[in-house]
Image (spheres, helix red, strand yellow):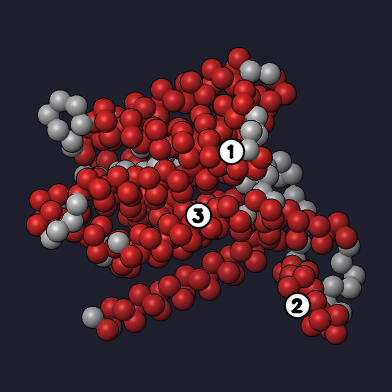
Amino acid sequence: MLTQITRTTALLIGLSLVLICSALVSITLGAASLSLAEVSSILGHKLLPSWAQVTETSEGISKAKQAIIWDIRLPRILLAVLVGAGLALVGTCLQAITRNSMADPYLFGASAGGSLGAVIVILHVGLFIGPYSLPLAAFIGALCSMLLVVFIAQQGHGLSQQKLLLTGVAVHFILMSLTNFLIFAGEQKAAGSAMFWMLGGLGMAQWSHLVFPAVVLGLALLLMMLRSGRLNAMMAGDETAATLGINVNRMRMAVLVVSALVTGVMVAFSGAIGFIGLMVPHLTRMLVGADNRKVLPVSALLGALLLVWADAGARVLIAPQDLPVGIITAMLGGSFFIYLMARK
């Protein structure tokens, strides 16, 4: 047991270091060519100004490059870390409580519901409570869509993995069609902004926006880690969990609410980025097994790492234009989905 814990700790430390290095390299990629030396200089100057002043690390770097590094790319990469970790965490939790290896906030309708809520605010309601409007609307949309999926899937002969998956796909397409209609019928100026939520992207990241996904992710990860034992029991089946004294319905509802909150907030700032929550939990279980005490933190780091590199690819593939990162994750996730279907 001690050896397993040590291995997991070593893996977490290793992934954290890889994530930091990946973030630094990712800052250099894009339409404007930057070097690691320039990135290190600017970050040192901003984070450790007294040290930077002594070593004069930031001299010779233009203000334009400083703005690109600190004001544009670093917030974008940090948002990619938060969104990737959040979606991977949600996917892990959904797969645990449904015992469905293909459960995902995108296929479960949560991303579509969050996008619908965000588009309604953008096109029709406006920022009625300031900066909290989009996260709140996206959360309500994500929660309603997930509850709708569960309600419909329970009709007939009970809840099954196949019914959950098919119902989630059906609800996803219905909600996306409603979102498309609102965009088509709305004002053209606002419709351009609303298309952001449909394709998924990180280009609108700002320092002031990062606090919302950071707080929600931190609380959700802590809450799920405290309940990782219950998630393990529910993976063994509702009857097994009930014999261990777990209120299955309450636990499932709590996880759905947390998942909707995380998905809604992430969608509010990044749009509908799909398939992170499908791929990462499977990759994580290949590394550490099925124990959610290890799967949850490792999947969060792997999700962050995957989205950081997906965003780097989005900035490079058709430079100087940015490709919506949701297109890249959909291509990767669709291929992985086909692999799972063929394998099982």
Say which element carries label 2: loop
Q: Which residue is mark 3?
A: 216
**Picture coordinates of residue 336, whole percent (x, y):** 37, 45
Query: Height in image: 295 above or below 326?
Result: below
Q: Are marks 1 and 3 in contact (CB under 8 Å)?
A: no
User: How far, Cα to Cα, is label 1 from label 3?
Assistant: 14 Å
**Picture coordinates of residue 327, whole percent (x, y):** 53, 39
Q: Which residue is mark 2?
A: 48
Say which element carries label 1: helix
Name the residue rendered at 22%, 45% in the picture. Answer: 249
In the depicted view, which residue is nearer to us: 219 or 92? Answer: 219
The numbered mark, 3 or 2, whose residue comes first in the sequence reads 2
Residue kind at label 1, given as amino acid type: Leu
Name the residue rendered at 46%, 48% in the picture. Answer: 262
Please say whether residue 166 is visible from this viewpoint.
no
> Which quarter of the rendering shows the N terminus?
bottom left
Mark 3 or mark 2: which is in front?
A: 3
Numbered circle sitting on residue 161: none
Query: Height in image: 185 above or below 169?
Result: above
In the picture as drawn, the residue positioned furthest to the front comes out as 129
Quadrant in the picture for residue 294: bottom left
Sort mark 1 into few (<14), some (14-19) or many (20+) by Cα contacts within 10 Å.
many
**Picture coordinates of residue 276, whole percent (x, y):** 44, 48
The numbered mark, 1 or 2, whose residue comes first in the sequence reads 2
Numbered circle sitting on residue 134: 1
Query: Height in image: 103 above or below 89?
Result: above
User: How far, Cα to Cα, is label 3 from label 2?
Assistant: 28 Å
